[in-house]
Amino acid sequence: MSARHTETRINPTRLTATRFTPALFHHGQKLLSEVLRSDLAADRVVADYFRQHRELGHADRGFVADAVFTVLRRKRSLSARCAGELTSRRLLLAALACLQGMNRRELGAVLSEAESHWLAHAKGVQVSELPAAVRLDLPDWLHGLLSEQFAGEDMEALVAALNQPAPLDLRVNPLKVGREEVLERLQAGGLRAEACRHSPLGIRLAGKPALSKHPLFVDGSIEVQDEGSQLLAFLVQPRRGEMVADFCAGAGGKTLLLGALMRSQGRLYAFDVAEQRLARLKPRLARSGLSNVHPVRIDSERDIKIRRLAGKLDRVLVDAPCSGLGTLRRNPSLKWRQTAASIAELSTRQAAILSAAASLVKAGGRLVYATCSLLEEENEAVVRAFLEQHSEFTLCSAQEIFAKQAIAIDCGEQLRLLPHRHGTDAFYAAAMERR
C-alpha cells in the first residue's frame, strides 16, 4: 500500500566550469520540464530520462540530477527571482547562478544578452526580505500548518534541513554480517562510512557513491535504508517464531529488517495492494537470505486474506500511505503536489487502514502505526481517534521499547523523528498493545 519511500540514488556532483557544456544545460532544462509536467514522482522521471540517455556519464548524470532537484527544493524563492517569466530555463539558470554559485562567464555559452542582464538582477534579490513562505520555499497552506504545529520551536531550522539533500544510509543484514565488519570493508574500499547515531544496524556514507555492484550489496549484506525507517522496525520489536505483518509493505525495506530481527523464523506477511511494488521486493528478498517472508497482494484493507488472519498476529506494522512530507530531502516535489484537501483525504484513508490492521492483532500483541509525514493531522490525530474508538488498545512508551534494545534516543511516548534534530527523514510512530 505504501509507495512513499522512494529514494533518489543519483550522485549529486558539484558542477565545475570545466565540466559545464551547453549540452549538459540542455539535458537539465529538458529533464526539469519533464519533471514539472509529470504526475509521476520526480525520481522516477529522472531515472527514466537517464535510461533513455545512456550517453550521459556518471558525473554528468550527477550534475543534471542535482540541478533539477535544487530547483524542486527551492522553486518558490527561485520563482521570485524570475521576474515574471517562470520557465524551466529561467528556473534552472537562477539555480545555477544564485544557489550553485556559477558566474555569468561560466554560464556565458548558454546565456543570451537579455538573460545576462536579468540574471544580474536575479542575483541581487534579497531573499531575506521575501515573505516567510516564499523564503522557506513552502506553499502557503503548508507554511501555515507547520508554523502552528511547531510554534515556539525552530521551524526555520526544520525547513532548512528538509531543503537539504538527504545523506545515504545503509542497513546491515545481521543474518550475514556485523556492522563493524561492514564498516571496515567500506572504509578499506575508500568509502567514508560511520555508524549511525541511533540504529544499531545503520551506517551513514559521505557522498552518494554507486553501490549497486558493490559485493556487500550484491550478496545482501547491506541495503539502502534511511536510519529513521530502520528505527520503525525496532519499535515493532518482532521475535523469533512470531506471526508478524508489514501491512503496507511497498518495496519491502522494513519487511526485510523485520525478517532479519526474527532471525528468519516464524511467519512474516508483506501485504500491499500494488503488484509492481511487491515485485520490487522479490530481488531484495532473494539477496537477503530470508525464508520467512510471504508477499501477498491484497485488493484493499478489507480483503478476505486479511479477515482470515483476524486476531492471530503477534505484531503488525502499519506504515500508512501518507503525504510523504517527511521525505522532502529526497522527494522535494511532494510539497508542490500535496494540498490541504489531499491531506484531509489521506487522514480518512489512514484511519480506515489502521482499523483494519488492528483486527489482525491478538491479545497481548503489538500494533505500530507510522508515517513519513510531519503533520499532526496524519499522525497524532489519527492515533487519538483510533484509541477513542478501540478501547482494547493502549499506548506503549516508544522510549521504553527502544531502551530495552539498548537504543538511546530521547523520544518520549510516541516517536517523532525530525531531520534537524535526529539527522533522519521525518517520521512519526506510535506503538499500541491489545489488552
Image (cartoon, rainbow, N blue to C red):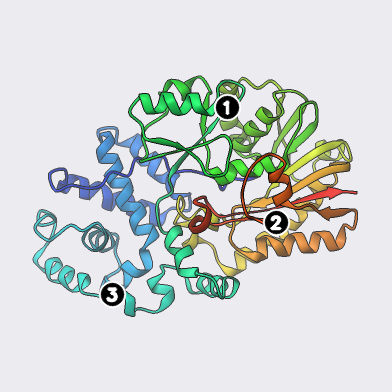
State how far apart marks 3 and 2 are (Cα).
45 Å
Against 67, residue 123 (above or below) is below
Location of residue 222 in the rendering, given as x and y in whole percent from the top left corner: 51, 28
Q: Position of residue 129 (x, y in %)?
A: 33, 80
Mark 3, secondary structure of its residue: loop
Closest to the camera, between mark 1 and mark 3, is: 1
> Picture coordinates of residue 238 (x, y %)?
74, 35
The N terminus - image quarter: top right
- Disc 1 versus disc 3: distance between alpha carbons? 51 Å
Q: Are marks 1 and 3 in contact (CB under 8 Å)?
A: no
* Residue of label 1: 173
SS class of the residue under badge 1? loop
Task: Specify the amino acid type for callout 2.
Answer: Gln
In percent of the image, x 81 and y 52: which residue is there? 355
Q: Earlier in the sequence, mark 1 or mark 3?
A: 3
Label 1: few (<14), some (14–19) or many (≥20) C-alpha neighbours in 10 Å: many
Q: Can see residue 248?
A: no
Q: Nearer the viewer, residue 307 or 199?
A: 199
Label 2 Cα crowd, 10 Å radius (few <14 / some 14-19 / many 20+): some
Q: Amino acid at mark 3?
A: Gly
Circle 1: residue type = Asn
Lateral position of residue 217 relative to residue 4, left or right: left
Ranked by sequence position, the earlier of labels 3 and 2 is 3
**How many residues crowd mark 3 within 10 Å: few (<14), some (14–19), many (20+)?**
few
How far apart marks 1 and 2 lie (CA) works out to: 27 Å
Q: Which mark is residue 118?
A: none
Q: Earlier in the sequence, mark 1 or mark 2?
A: 1
Q: Pointer 3: what residue?
A: 84
Residue bearing the label numbered 2: 414
Q: Quadrant of residue 55?
A: top left
**Res 365 seen here:** yes
